[in-house]
Amino acid sequence: MSKIYGLTGGIASGKSTVLNLFRNHNFIVYDADYVARDVVKLGTLGLDQIVE
């Protein structure tokens, strides 16, 4: 059975460093910051809805 862990913390607390360490050890990771940036790219529905 797989385990799921959550990684949280404040700004500049080392979350990205730990995430990269997980990646380097072949963990499957879900980076919510990456997804959030993708959702609000110029020309996306997500950004258009925020602007409205």
Image (cartoon, rainbow, N blue to C red):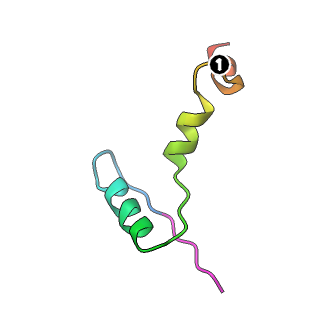
Badge 1 density bin: few <14, some 14–19, many ≥20, Cα 10 Å: few
Quarter of the figure with the C terminus: top right
Which quadrant would residue 39 be assigned to in this image?
A: top right
**Which residue, given by chain and number where applicable, does mark 1 sit on?**
43
Main SS of residues in magenta = loop
Which quadrant would residue 25 be assigned to in this image?
A: bottom left
Q: Amino acid at mark 1?
A: Gly
Residue occupying image coordinates x 55% and y 67% = 28
Give the vertical position of 36 relative to 22 (above or below). Answer: above
Residue occupying image coordinates x 32% and y 45% = 11
Pick whichever, 20 or 51, lies toward us. 20
Residue occupying image coordinates x 54% and y 48% = 32
Give the vertical position of 16 relative to 38 (above or below). Answer: below
Residue occupying image coordinates x 56% and y 38% = 36
Give the vertical position of 49 relative to 15 (above or below). Answer: above
The spot of residue 26 in percent (x, y) is 48, 73
Which quadrant would residue 44 be assigned to in this image?
A: top right
**Which secondary structure lies at badge 1?**
loop
**In magenta segment, residue 40:** no
Q: Magenta stretch?
A: 1-6
The spot of residue 17 in percent (x, y) is 32, 58
